Image: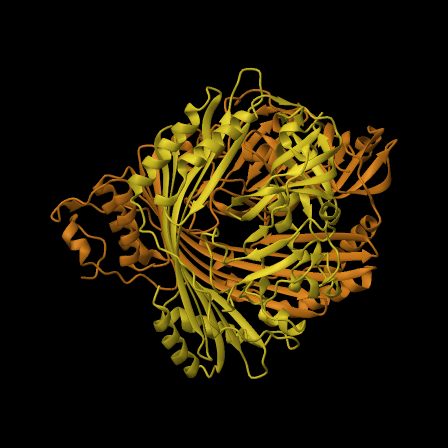
Amino acid sequence: MTAAIFEQPLRLEQILSLSYNATPDKFDKTWKAPLSTLLGLGRAVGADFVEFFLERKNYISCLAEDDAITSISPSLVSGAGVRVFKGSSDCYVSTNDLSFEGLKAALEKGLAIMGLEMPDSTASVPEINLEPLRDYGLGRGKDNWLASCPSMQTMGEVLLEANAALAEKADHVQARRAAYFRDCQEVLVASSDGTFARDIRLTQSVGFNLLCADGEHRSSIGERLGNTGDPSFLTAWDYSETAEKVAEAASNMLYADYVESGNYPIIMANHFGGVIFHEACGHLLETTQIEKETTPFMNKKGQKVAHESLTAWDEGLSTEAFGTIDMDDEGMPVQRTLLIENGILKNFISDRAGEMRTGHPRTGSGRRQGYTHAAASRMRNTYIAPGEHTVEELFASVDKGIYCKKMGGGSVGPTGQFNFAVDEAYLIEDGKITKPLKGATLIGEATGIMNKISMCSDDISLAPGFCGSVSGSVYVTVGQPHIRVDDITVGGR
Amino acid sequence: MAKVQTISQQAEAIAQKLNIAKYDIYGSSVDETSVQVDKGKPKQVKASNRSSVIVRVWNDQNQIGVTSTTDVDETGLEMALKTAYEASSFGVKENAPDFSPQAKELTAEVDFTKSEPAPVPELIETLVDAEKGVLDSHEAIASVPYNGIAQREIERFYLNSEGAQRSEERTYASVYLYGKTEQEGRKPRAAGAMRVKNGLAQLEVSDCVKEAAEKTISHLDYEKIASGKYPVVFSAEAFLSLLGAFSNMYNAQNILDNRSLSTAESIGTQVASPLLSVYDDELHLENVSAETFDGEGTPTRRLALIEKGVLKNFIHSAGTAKRMNAEPTGHASIGAKVSIGLNYIEVLPGESADDAYQLDKADGVVLIDDLQALHAGVNALQGSFSLPFDGWLIKDGKRISVESATVAGDFRQVLKSIEHIEPEAETTPGGICPRVWISELSITGEA
């Protein structure tokens, strides 16, 4: 039989013969009936909570190397994940099969794994009363985003023009790359607490990677811009400006000396400098870390954990920022979450499981790479708030130190130890930049570094990033103004 | 996922309908179950069954277009072929990839026995016992925050429009345990271990427990290390990490892209100490994940990369081999731009040495067990690295855990500074390697 919303609870034997005609190429209200039936089945069998996450993704990447397009790579992805909670345990089953039968099979597998047995075939299975579709895909013309994005032809043309501009501006070029990707994702979340919400996300990124060489001297510099929600992002890209910045940095670093290891005060630039807070503190404020007892901040809410000059936020609301989303991957609208205010720990970053297992309320931070991952508490746009100093005041405060102008990646370990690579660094002597340095790595401990950020300037800037963690790789923003760290260990030669 | 014969027939019919004469398809299907536990109870169980294919299409101008999809039914396949055909008009005109000339050659016979998946309760019980084993090994070990057992069954295939068609199935099981200590007035310390085998029954879980516990305990009594230059010994895992991080040295695609530490003329040059010989051998008996063909259908094989310090071969795809007048080597992953990667590395053991190279008699040597954050601290294009590590300072033959430090250097210099390679090799999930002694590297300790 073809199902709709039923007046009487279904019996299990009826579900076995159901078929649904949900819209195949769009997650709309026609998905309500099959999902409310399956959620009801999960609850009837004994699960405390059941959630479906459905995803379709249309992704394309384009790569220009020197003066040729060497890769255009479209990817079409669809699938679903079902999460079943029983007590403090949960199970996550994912499948490529979006049919009713496929979703039901995934649910049944999850229920079986949790040790929940199907009741008698005559058992009554009340459907879950889902809310009317909360459709974030209707706003801001999202349904037309994909069609409005650049064609393959345009992608190729822009990247080749950009690479030509880079060639003009850079010296000693060994290899040039311009890369772009567009990720258009449609998601639907339905859960046994009545959540029924859809969203469309458009994420794009474009940037350069430049390798320069002169004899044994080499430098490689990358720069990437990111955007959510603007189909004209690529065509509006000021590649000349980016090319100039990359060429200058590569030129400065080509003949740089290796940094001498030791302890220094550092000035860390704004923009991607925010990766230090992301790695050294942000991850440790995720409730997944509290669950594992791998954060030194777990019992510190309301206590001083950082220098009084430091205030920090995590939010999903900044217009077109790389970590901006209208709802998280558990169907909750995102919010602006104050993490640290004047050095006092105010809130953690929490998802549904985090709230259940740690008691910290959800913050719209349940995120995942896609349907193959269960959501987890993850950062969105995370940054240190601007302070009252000027950049000049920060530099003037340093007799001998390091200016970390461009950060590379980093990570934080289970004991709170972090590390960051510095792609572009300079020696500061008597408050002035004197020479470029390469090969620097910053190492330290989260609890220590947070108390050493003693000065923040007034020039906050955000940068896009990719954050890999327990629920896969997600798009995030890091950011900060220029900051002074009083003392940090710099690994080098 | 449909059987490869079915996909082949469907693709042939769709290609005819779309007037596509030349195409190839690589696909895989993964059925996976994993569990994590927390203090004796299951925390999360994950199960997935996912399939995907990558389709390459050549147009009349011999330009190539690619599309990947997870919709591995007839409709999804048609959409993928259509999209790939559309993309082909933007494909490269010079040096366009072609089918591997070896895509129909015989692959190696590998003695592989598939394992039946274990039921989830057995996975949980095994992991709960393993967690308990680590916790019980020392009172200071307060938790095992990162742990897991996973089992997966993988089916993969390659086919092309000229009749090449090959497939294989594999099963794997893995366990990892990462213990963390807590002691009053001391910093938390952590270390772990991992094992991979064909199935749960073969998995040496008790060995993994023992190693995770011993390593974690060995870091309890830690000390700061003074920054400076030290003789360094890399463990098997650490040295293999470095060889992998700088794989552009032997990667033909990187060389053609001018993004390598080598050039096309580097073959035959001395790049390392004569003590070093490195092979890539996907078919090695110890490689539980041995695959007999790569993403272009080329059979995998044993290949000398460095012999007695001399660079012997690059790893190739069909496209790079054609451009560099060589043979494809079975290291390609299909894609819009074919990528090339190492398979399973074997570093040959060295000879016995005198007391100067005995760890239990050494003094002032740093033993690096595990290099971390390679994604951040390696500049593969410059050849430099600056990496945090887990390890010990050897003082009068005794191991003293290093509190927090980085090791920095130049990869090419490391290869040339090898003073000794120990006679016994260790098998790891990523390859086989003995401990390797380097004359000197910069160590920076946290102040």
Q: Is residue B15 above or below residue A38?
A: below
Q: Residue furthest left?
A: A122
* Residue A362 visible in the shown view: no
Q: Position of residue A290 (x, y in %)?
A: 47, 29
Residue ID at (46%, 68%) = B107
Q: Residue furthest top?
A: B184
Residue B316, quarter of picture:
bottom right
Residue ID at (51%, 40%) = A378
Tell which of A192 and B91 is nearer to you. Answer: B91
> In which quadrant of the rendered image does the C terminus of chain A lie?
top right
Tell which of B440 and A33 is nearer to you. Answer: B440
* Residue A380 visible in the shown view: yes
Color encoding of the figure:
by chain
Residue B124, quarter of picture:
top left
User: Going by the image, does B59 lie left or right of A110?
Assistant: right
Residue A45, quarter of picture:
top left
User: Going by the image, does A425 lie left or right of B35?
Assistant: right
> In which quadrant of the rendered image does the N terminus of chain A lie?
bottom left
Q: Position of residue B249 (x, y in %)?
A: 68, 56
Q: Position of residue A331 (x, y in %)?
A: 41, 45
Q: Is residue B374 above or below residue B52?
A: above
Residue ID at (30%, 57%) = A102
Q: Is residue A100 above or below residue B87?
A: above
Q: Position of residue A341 (x, y in %)?
A: 60, 27
* Number of numbered labels in the structure image: 0
* Chain letter, yellow: B
- Color of chain A here? orange
Tell which of A81 and A130 is nearer to you. Answer: A81
Q: Is residue B162 above or below residue A1?
A: below
Tell which of B418 and A312 is nearer to you. Answer: B418
